[in-house]
Amino acid sequence: MLEVRNLRKTFGDFVAVDDVAFRLEVGGSLAVVGESGSGKTTTARMIAGLEQPTAGSIAVAGKERGPGRPRGAGRRARAREIQMVFQDPYSSLDRRQRVRDAVAEAVRLHRPLRGPALAARVDELLDLVGVDERQAGSLPRALSGGQRQRVAIARALAAEPQVLILDEAVAALDVSIQAQILNLLAHIRTTTGTTLLFITHDLGVVPHICDEVLVMRSGQVVESGPVPSVLREPQHDYTRRLVASVPKPGWKPRRRAQPPAA
Amino acid sequence: MSAAAPLLDIRGLRIDLPTGAGSATAVHRVDLALAAGEAAALVGESGSGKSLTARSVLRLLPPGAEVHGELRFAGESVPGMSRTRLREFRAGEVAMVFQDPRAHINPARSVGDFLVEGLTAARGVPVREARRRVEAVLQEVGIPDAERRMRQRPGELSGGLLQRVMIAAALAAEPKLLLADEPTTALDVTTQEEVMAIVTEAREARGLAMLFITHDLELAAAVCDRVVVMYAGSTVEELPSGALHHGAAHPYTRALLASRPSVGDTASGLRAIAGRPLSGFEVPAGCSFAPRCPRARDACRTDTPLLRAAGTGTSACHYPHITEEAEQRA
């Protein structure tokens, strides 16, 4: 479904992403895990077409995504390939637009629906993400962070994308809400067959939503493979360190290395 | 706990904040005692009132906030302190570290000036002595090239390094209590481990007490002796860290544990809590967790539960969950 080869991005002399490659099968779910400066978000932005790669190729369903930003129909066709949901749903929603209208607008961009047919599709999407009638009539500011993130996911799904990229989409949410959204994403994956690319700094959420994981550090992939084996038997020193840093029962913080230069 | 007065003693704390139309209660009831050298975590989701509670210890509340109940430090009433006494108290007895260090340090001044001034201006330590102490404490928090770092501006340091500087500033004042408000939430997980290891070592070396504010139950249990859980402006459970996983009696604590994803999990659904966390402003009659609680019965919707002994700790619940293990331990 998604194939990335030799992806590279430089900003001046700084190499943000260095030779990243992976394949993601139809209906698969891949986690890209890394700390700040790992290049995980830049990788996601290049795949979504928000950032121009310095080198390398990205293909969706066997179709190469060319350089430049297409307009009109070409742009909408691209939107149906890949959609992205961000960490802060508040900044990606129009604060003057009611939730139902925001979702309807996204549907109309991609499907020639009007009247009852449009309303039915909007209801279907709102129902899928668990936004109720009252919330659908609200402005974004009247909603909690978790509800806003549901709306952002509904808008992304309106395009019926082949690949959904989630960039730290649960990072800003309270623990109890985070679990709801993770369960929702797992549900969406089973019901719609959407391929997921999950960008996160939090290893803990990975087993719940992904089959495969790719660990990045300083722009490079240090380790990749099926989630259970990478998390239980990490091969690379850095992955081991990352797994060991996550608080769990019986865990005590330890000093492990010299502080990073900065 | 010893028979002597606890270092920090909070009883029936209530905080009202001014609103457009009068005032509203943000913190309803917090009960918490901390002995010298002890570490307790205040754990909760957004709106639970954990940060307001921590800030009330230093009287760092928004203008117009009203504090009710008792708040004592080494037996002395904090709300009763004069301005002079409060300044002395903040400079030497309690130090605070925040989530965002950049919001609490002047970006135009050097790190060294910031650290040294903390001692010379507020505590009257001579400059040479202050520099010596600052360099020593920077070494202690794992900043080996202290001299170079002291010449740098905050903007030249990474988030993790700057947070170490803030911890160094807190330690240099030689306080008896450290208030740490989500000090590692904005940091990478490997940096979080370093920073928490440094805080733990420094606490043990100095017999420093800590009130650790966090949303992360697992981290709380790892670095503190006791865990105090807050929900919608009240403390709902308190228990020893070691009993968290098997002895939690309050349905909210248990639900939080079940909804937290973990690296060792298998690919199954998380047990999410329906609804969203309430803030202190919106609590209903009865138990504030009742609308989301699977165990709630009629009494929960009318009578507000108070903290009482349950299992290995205390729990504000009419129908606490008592495990066999907890019974045996108790």
Image (tube, coloured by chain):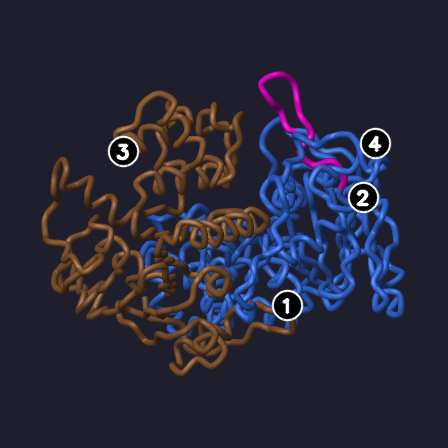
Chain colours: A brown, B blue
Residues flagged by tags 4 and 1 on a common chain: yes
**Above-or-below relation of B141 to B59:** below
User: Of marks 1 and 2, which one's residue comes earlier in the chain?
Assistant: 2
Q: Which type of secondary structure does the marked residue at label 1 adopt?
A: helix
Q: Which SS class for mark 3?
A: loop
Q: Are marks 1 and 2 in contact (CB under 8 Å)?
A: no
Q: Do labels 1 and 3 share a chain?
A: no
Q: Is residue B262 above or below residue A165?
A: below
Identified at 83% across, 31% down, the residue is B302
Kindly report which numbered mark, 1 or 2, lies closer to the viewer in this rendering. 1
Chain that bears disc 4: B
Task: Specify the segment rendered in magenta.
Answer: B17-29
The kind of residue on which mark 2 rests is: Arg
Label 1 resides on the chain identified as B
Q: Mark 3, residues whose alpha carbon is within 10 Å: few (<14), some, or many (≥20)?
A: few
Q: Let me know if marks 3 and 4 both belong to one chain.
A: no
Kindly identify which residue carries mark 1: B222
